[in-house]
Image (tube, rainbow, N blue to C red):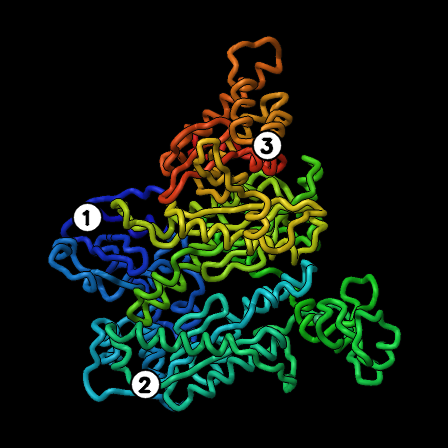
Amino acid sequence: MKAIRWTDWMFHPVSEQPESYAPDPNDLVWQDPVTETIFFMPEEEYDGLLRQLEEKLATMSAEERFWHVWHQDTIPFGTREPLQLAPHMPYPKPLYARHWHNATKSERMRTRLSDHVLIRTGLYYALYHPNKENWPALRKQLLQIHSPIAQPIDQFLSTGQWIGEPQQLSIVKAGAVKIKQYFMETSHLQEVRGASLLLDELNRKRILRLLAEYWTPEILVYSGGGNFLILCPEAEGPLCAGKIEELFKTVTIHAKCVAHTETFSIRDLAMDRFQDNLSWLEMRKHELQMLKLPPTDDISPDINAYRSKQMDISFKIDHLNDADRHRLAAHADSFLRTSDKPLCQQCRQRIADVQIDPYQDEPRLCCNTCLHKIIAGKNRSVFVEEMKDLFQRLGKPFADMALAETLEDIIKSQRERYGKDELAVIYGDGNNMGAVVEQIRSFQVYRYFSHLTASITKYALYTTLQELILENHQHDKAPFEIIAVGGDDLFFIVPGLYGLETAKRLGRKFDAGFRKYPASGDDEEKLTLSVGICFAPYKIPLTVLFSTAEELLKSAKQHKKQSRVRGGTLDFMKLESNSPFSQNVQTYRQLNHVRTVRTSTGKQFTLHHLFRPYSWDETDAMQTFIRKLKNIDTARQLAFRLRDSVIQMSTKEANLYYLVHFCTARFDDKQDEDRHCVHECYRAFLDAPWTKEKNIKEKYFPYIIIQDENQEHLYTPWHDVMELWDMEEEELWQESLPSNGT
Ligand SMILES: [Zn+2]
């Protein structure tokens, strides 16, 4: 048996080929419940880390134990610090390697020590509902490694068996509604950032403080991407559900969160019944999320609810009463008012509540929802703070820099250097999540899964931005903006020239982070990433860029599902300032870029102008192809002509045109030579590694014929080449290009 050294993985979790070893018979070996990777560590190391942690815990109060040891938002990848590693070790103690072969699958699986201790504490609280006076002492006993008072619960967590009288508890499942609409109500970068910051704080910080005030924060099983799972004393489920909904309303006013609660017997949550019951709860919550609830006006807005520190407000806020509104409505543009009330100038959807001057330009009318976003947007991005922590662990430099204030700030240095105004808006999301979640049989795995996806996603994104954008350049303002990264979801903006490479590297890392190691053939792929990239001049409204990226993500995901390509996928589109395309990418392409072609012998093909969506290998090959073409003087015109031949000529004519002009062996002039070089580049493109996964039937230049189950498809790369031509710059990462496909 081969296994991965756990401390290697903690240091670098997204290695494509982590080194595997044959463990010593006395080493500890276990399997990851999400990726199924087999890990090992020497027993002395395990015992040593545990001992160090125990010594540290002995000096701490219950509060300190929770906040400084057990509770961590992300897995501290990149660390070799014993005390940082210890809470993430497997628990209960794993098997010896010598017992591995006779063990069952469930005997091999382990989650982390911190998952075990926190779920144990939360379950204890929910099942026995201790009173406020007794809880601190009990909590302290539960928040240590070995806890005699938790014996029945520990047994339940390890084996799924509940000994003794069955106890009841409530479980609350909550989920935010239409988060993306909430982000994207306005195109102002700082407001979008503010919305993101508020949601992220709710997910990770404020919810815990709320639970700490009424119950205890250990009852939170997980929170991520606006979803929460909470254990609660039987009678208190509805109160908890209500408090969560209220918290969201108070802080965001308009981003709703719905919560559903049910009572269960602890026996209903044993491993064999766990998933059925949790899926049912999820379904009920989902039904609530789908309901169109009328807006409630019983909200008292408080941007600082359950926040440790008050947010800075750097501008004056004038609250409007009805007389003010009436007066202001009389002067408002007709599309910015109702019959007697002015609308918010930011979202143009709601009645204005205040008048403010946040950007020192001119006073604005604003609703409370947008006001909170504006205030929050002036605070520092949480994601930059996280990046800083990660790079510190990795020993990489991180120059503190100001955030971009506008989209123009993001492209500033690109424009100075390359004269280009395009942004890349990138939206990514994991494939196969549902199938992985269905396999979950315990609260600990739920918790671990939520932490693992968020941590790998962040690690992949932050290290990629560091390598590509931060490492070699000096910036006074950050040339990127991370709008959301939570769970397996990513939404960020980089300068256009970095779009394709960032998405591909990030995707490869994500896929590697979730692969099963040691690699063993077909079953090694678990979660993969799909990405949509919208390239566009920064002046196009962000809402348009975002919805386009969202559409492209759908297309990339569909490709992943249908094509059975290995690893993740990406799709892209470049918008011009007056693009004909509006919103629905698939329909637009079906109408403009797919044709059915019949040959003279009656044979039928589908002709695709577009070569995308791509796998990561195809992205590599396309980038190399374009880079090589750029070294040929007239390649741009030639590629342009080939693209036109595909649109204007019949397939036979286009083929003849290609053969005559590009495959000639006679070089009369420079033109002929260039054409020959273009042909050579194209051939190299068609010999790159991506072709191994495609069933290429024939190179019918300028087309290639790919056979799928039902019929033959003609593809050409020329539309893609032209669209990406200005979005690939040879010098940016030529040296650092991994496995470049040729
Ligand atoms: Zn508004």
Seen from the viewer's position, the closer of residues 114 and 642 is 642
Q: CA distance from mark 3 to mark 1?
A: 56 Å
Q: Earlier in the sequence, mark 2 or mark 3?
A: 2
Judge the density around disc 2: few (<14), some (14-19), many (≥20) Cα neighbours within 10 Å.
Answer: many
Which quarter holds ligand 1?
A: bottom right
Element type at mark 2? helix
x then y, percent, for residue 154: 24, 75
User: x, y percentage for residue 598?
Assistant: 49, 37
Mark 3 — residue?
A: 643
Identify which residue, 686 or 600, lies in the foreground: 600
Rendered location of residue 197, percent (x, y)? 59, 65
Task: Note whether residue 391 is visible.
Answer: no
Q: Is residue 643 left or right of residue 14?
A: right
Q: Dot 3: what SS? A: helix
Measured Cα–Cα span from mark 1 to mark 2: 40 Å
Q: Quadrant of residue 329?
A: bottom right
Tag 1: residue type? Pro
